[in-house]
Amino acid sequence: MLITRASEYAILSLILLSKTNEPQDSETLSQELSISKSFLAKILQTLAKDGILKSFKGVNGGFILALRPKDISMLRIMTCVEGKAPAVFDCASSADDCPSDRATLCSIWPFLNKLQGKIDIFLAELTLDDILKED
């Protein structure tokens, strides 16, 4: 589940918004990205509720970044859009929360948990600014 379409569209939208100081509406962004306007509008509203974006109503309304790109981590974006922290595997973060109640029999859970921890750290450290530098 690591990167869903919602996370992908959120990141792509934030890249476009980082390149302008003028509010961009969801229709313009959806056309530029060739994605569903209604789906993108929900994503942008979620990002605005979390304080990643500012939204403006009216004729010249739209969305702009509320934070500097260096202050927006990939972990924050993905957690905001998905409603939960991104997970590579269906394994729980704690053996006590194992959905199959068989954590004590699972020989790979410690490895998967350690891998997820490293991915979480990577996503927390990777910022929108880092992505922009690669662009």
Image (cartoon, rainbow, N blue to C red):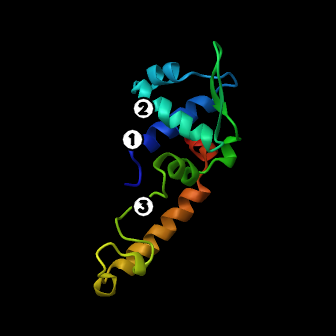
Residue ID at (64%, 16%): 58
What is the x, y in percent for residue 89?
A: 35, 64
Give the x, y percent position of residue 134: 55, 42
- The earlier-in-sequence mark between 3 and 2 is 2
Which residue is denoted by mark 1 in the rendering? 5
Q: Which is more foreground, mark 2 or mark 1? A: 2
User: From the image, which quarter does the N terminus lie in?
Assistant: bottom left
Query: For the residues marked 3 and 2, what is the alpha-carbon distance in whole angstroms?
Result: 22 Å
Tell me the amino acid under the disc marked 2.
Phe
Q: Nearer the viewer, residue 107 or 85?
A: 85
Few, some or many residues within 10 Å of mark 1 (<14, 14–19, 20+): few
Q: Secondary structure at mark 3?
A: loop
- Tell me whether the residue at label 2 lies in contact with that at label 1, contact meaning CB atoms closer than 8 angstroms: yes
Q: Which residue is mark 3?
A: 87
* Residue found 51% across the figure and 40% down from its top: 11
Residue nearest the observer in this picture, 27 or 49: 49
Residue 113 is drawn in which quadrant? bottom left
Q: Nearest the camera: 22 or 94?
A: 94
Q: Earlier in the sequence, mark 3 or mark 1?
A: 1
Question: Tag on residue 70?
Answer: none
Sequence order check, earlier mark of 2 and 1: 1
Spatial CA distance of label 3 from label 1 is 15 Å
> What amino acid is found at the position of numbered circle 1 in the picture?
Arg
> Considering the numbered disc 1 on the image, is that residue within a helix, a strand or a loop?
helix
85 with respect to 105 (left or right)? right
Residue identifier under label 2:
39
Q: Crowdedness of circle 3 by 10 Å Cα count: few (<14), some, many (20+)?
A: some
Quadrant (top left/top right/bottom left/bottom right) for the C terminus: top right
In the orientation shown, which residue stands out farthest toward the bottom?
104
